[in-house]
Image: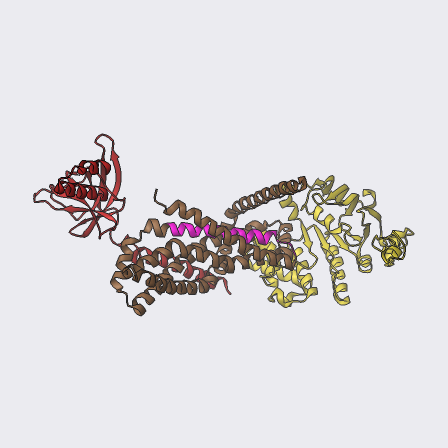
Chain colours: A red, B yellow, C brown
């Protein structure tokens, strides 16, 4: 096999490899959706972020418009500080609110933005002031038990509330 | 010893050597190889002839003593020195050691391409000249799988002399060849030596062929010692029983026929141990 | 009793010596690489021998694995009503695990054994010694190009395995079973991350390529210069490389994919 033909075959091989990676990256993964360069950042604080993870989607009206960039604990106010990367083309009024929602009944959690009514939009670095924390299953159950007990008017209600950890 | 040969190319001086941890193969041997001469190293299998070639080539360091190449002590651990020395020598391995993935031409061209900057036309000329010297110019395009053992050895010889080395070492060049190929090989070794002025070291146990072409010979014993040395006529006429046994090819003598064993009667249960 | 301890101690020391020998060989190989890179044609020729010629087995295996994965996962997912996630599951299985690992095992079997046999036979035929005597370092000229070629070829082969597998899964899932094509791709795209899944898969295949090629070259170089020696060397290559790949797979998966 001549030198030139070997080099040609190897060139084809490497090219195939490159095409394979491009195929995987574009067709089979999320690179095609949006590149990370064209985003701006907003922050939001939550009393409880629940099961929200980094890289979880940020959706509005069900459409993915961004990703959660980071989740840290604010050491002064003891709240979860969430930073969001939003696509540059999407803007929200500066009284929009953020909620942590669950996709499906028991699925992954994501951050939903409900638009407000103001004309002025959020700019990069702004904080979403109105937030609603994630729904924690235990507090749901304790609320349910508490309200049931309150309805019945029995004295076991405070005991039930105390025994469920006293979470808000 | 040097007074016997005049100008000495390779001097082996009181060398002791054994592979790590194993038995001592060479036991205080001293040899001298005259410049421009063909010197043979004879001996039975396992007496250290090939080991001696490897020591001269710097593959292993000697345990004691020294080997001098043109008055320069060979240090097997000094890579740069070995690199320069090895470009002045060519070695013919026992079965050729040709590169099986290359053609005859490419095998001979290999050292030229690796060590010189000559362009392809010059390399082609040199390769064809070397192949012509061994009589295989017409076989240049054959693959190694297609040539016979005798031809392979000649190609290996052409490769060994590609860079016109000052020292050529032959490891059992006659082993396994038919009578015609053997005399072709012997002829080549002698002619090459005379025309190029190189020094040749021949390791073999073929006494007749060696004696027909060498100027001087050493006989090694299986204990790794030099038993005798001299010109072929001297060795042929020697009265030493070990020398006579080897030169004449006698089945039993100082080198025993029987491997050491218990007495025969004991093994067959006739006599109590 | 003491002789048993003595033998154990001796065995342990021998094991340490073998590790050290491997490490020395690896370092010498690395040291020989720059010289090999100055002769790119040598590396290219080896990429052809190791990579190109493995394409057939890798692509056909990738296709077959893609088919089987789609089939198996479909029957598992359909019981939970999650058949639409078939594309996602297949992709993750391939790019994260099966692509690198299966390719590495096939590579060890095909390319690894041919390397070991080739080097072993070259050593037995004194070709490496002849090169040494010609003042040419056999490590730079023979071993290092093959090592570099292995490092380059393995990731390419693994990527192709995964890509072909996904295409095969598409054929089975969408064309044969009837899963919705749009969902197949979109759920896959939203769940697979380029850096985390594909990138880590490529890193894995690179590490596996290093293991397979290194073991193959070592076993060939250290094999006894007899036909049995070379035969043992090739079987050892497959066994040791395969085990090495599987163990490293566990380590790498634990490092890369477990959420802190």
Residue at far front of view: A154
Task: Using the rendered view, name the quadrant where residue B99 is placed.
Answer: bottom right
Left or right placement of residue C131 versus residue A69 in this view: right
Residue B25, given in percent of the width and then of the height, sits at 76, 46
Look at the magenta stretch and give its main secondary structure.
helix
Query: Measured from the top left, where is residue B137 in percent x and y?
Result: 64, 65
- Front one among C237 and B72: C237
Residue A5: x and y, percent? 47, 64
Q: Nearer the viewer, residue A34 or A9?
A: A34
Counting from the top left corner in percent of width and height, residue C161 is at 40, 60
Q: What is the number of callouts on the image?
A: 0
Residue placed at 31% from the left, 60% from the top?
A: C77
Q: Nearer the viewer, residue C161 or B63?
A: C161
Can see residue B169? yes
Q: Residue at x 50, y 50 (%)?
A: C244
Range of residues picked out in magenta? C200-225
Given the current orientation, which residue lies at the most extreme top position?
Answer: A76
Horizontal side of residue A31 vs B20, given as left or right: left
- On whether residue B273 falls in the magenta region, the answer is no
Q: Quadrant of the N terminus of chain B?
A: top right
Residue, far right? B239
State whether residue C162 is above or below residue A58: below
Q: Residue at x 33, y 63 (%)?
A: C75
Instruction: Relative to B194, say whether A153 is above or below.
Output: above
- The answer to whether residue B55 is left or right of residue A116 is right
Residue A47 seen in the figure: no
Is residue C212 highlighted in magenta? Answer: yes
Left/right of residue C191 with respect to residue A47 in the rendered view: right
């Amino acid at each position: 096999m001549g030198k030139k033909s070997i080099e040609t075959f190897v060139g084809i091989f490497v090219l195939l490899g490159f095409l394979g990676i491009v195929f995987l990256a574009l067709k089979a993964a999320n690179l095609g959706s949006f590149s990370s360069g064209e985003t701006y950042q907003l922050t939001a604080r939550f009393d409880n972020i629940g099961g929200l993870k980094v890289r979880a989607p940020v959706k509005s009206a069900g459409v993915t418009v961004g990703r959660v960039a980071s989740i840290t604990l604010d050491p002064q106010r003891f709240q979860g500080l969430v930073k969001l990367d939003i696509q540059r083309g999407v803007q929200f009024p500066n009284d929009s609110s953020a909620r942590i929602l669950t996709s499906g009944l028991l699925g992954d959690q994501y951050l939903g933005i409900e638009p407000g009514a103001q004309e002025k939009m959020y700019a990069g670095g702004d904080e979403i002031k109105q937030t609603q924390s994630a729904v924690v299953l235990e507090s749901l159950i304790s609320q349910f038990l508490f309200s049931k007990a309150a309805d019945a008017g029995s004295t076991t209600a405070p005991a039930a509330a105390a025994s469920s950890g006293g979470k808000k | 010893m040097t007074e016997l040969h005049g100008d000495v190319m390779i001097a082996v001086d009181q060398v002791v050597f054994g592979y790590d941890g194993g038995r001592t193969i060479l036991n205080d041997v001293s040899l001298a190889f005259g410049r421009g001469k063909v010197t043979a190293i004879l001996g039975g299998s396992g007496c250290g002839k090939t080991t001696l070639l490897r020591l001269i080539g710097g593959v292993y360091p000697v345990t004691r003593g020294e080997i001098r190449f043109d008055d320069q002590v060979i240090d097997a651990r000094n890579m740069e020195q070995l690199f320069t020395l090895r470009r002045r020598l060519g070695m013919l391995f026992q079965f050729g050691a040709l590169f099986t993935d290359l053609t005859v031409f490419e095998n001979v061209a290999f050292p030229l391409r690796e060590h010189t900057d000559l362009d392809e036309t010059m390399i082609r000329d040199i390769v064809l000249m070397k192949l012509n010297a061994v009589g295989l110019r017409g076989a240049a395009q054959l693959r190694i799988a297609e040539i016979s053992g005798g031809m392979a050895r000649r190609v290996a010889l052409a490769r060994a002399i590609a860079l016109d080395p000052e020292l050529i070492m032959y490891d059992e060049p006659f082993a396994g060849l038919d009578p015609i190929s053997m005399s072709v090989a012997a002829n080549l070794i002698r002619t090459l030596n005379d025309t190029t002025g190189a020094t040749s070291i021949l390791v073999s146990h073929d006494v007749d062929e060696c004696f027909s072409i060498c100027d001087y010979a050493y006989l090694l014993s299986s204990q790794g010692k030099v038993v005798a040395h001299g010109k072929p006529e001297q060795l042929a006429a020697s009265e030493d029983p070990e020398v006579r046994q080897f030169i004449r090819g006698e089945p039993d003598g100082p080198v025993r026929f029987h491997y050491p064993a218990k007495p025969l009667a004991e093994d067959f249960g006739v006599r109590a141990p | 009793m003491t002789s048993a301890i003595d033998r154990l101690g001796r065995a342990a020391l021998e094991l340490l010596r073998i590790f050290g020998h491997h490490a020395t060989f690896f370092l010498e190989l690395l040291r020989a690489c720059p010289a090999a890179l100055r002769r790119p044609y040598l590396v290219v020729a080896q990429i052809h021998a190791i990579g190109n010629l493995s394409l057939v087995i890798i692509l056909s295996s990738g296709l077959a694995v893609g088919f089987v994965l789609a089939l198996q996962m479909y029957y598992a997912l359909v019981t939970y009503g999650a058949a639409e996630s078939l594309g996602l599951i297949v992709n993750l299985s391939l790019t994260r695990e099966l692509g690198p690992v299966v390719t590495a095992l096939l590579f060890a079997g095909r390319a690894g054994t041919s390397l070991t046999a080739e080097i072993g036979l070259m050593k037995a035929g004194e070709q490496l010694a002849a090169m040494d005597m010609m003042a040419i370092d056999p490590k730079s000229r023979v071993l290092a190009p093959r090592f570099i070629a292995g490092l380059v070829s393995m990731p390419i082969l693994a990527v192709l395995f995964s890509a072909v597998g996904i295409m095969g899964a598409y054929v089975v899932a969408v064309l044969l079973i009837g899963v919705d094509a749009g969902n197949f791709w979109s759920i896959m795209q939203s769940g697979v991350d380029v850096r985390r899944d594909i990138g880590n898969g490529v890193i894995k295949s690179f590490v596996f390529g290093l293991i397979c090629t290194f073991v193959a070259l070592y076993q060939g170089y250290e094999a006894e210069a007899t036909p049995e020696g070379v035969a043992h060397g090739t079987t050892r290559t497959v066994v040791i490389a395969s085990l090495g790949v599987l163990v490293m797979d566990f380590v790498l998966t634990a490092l890369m994919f477990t959420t802190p």
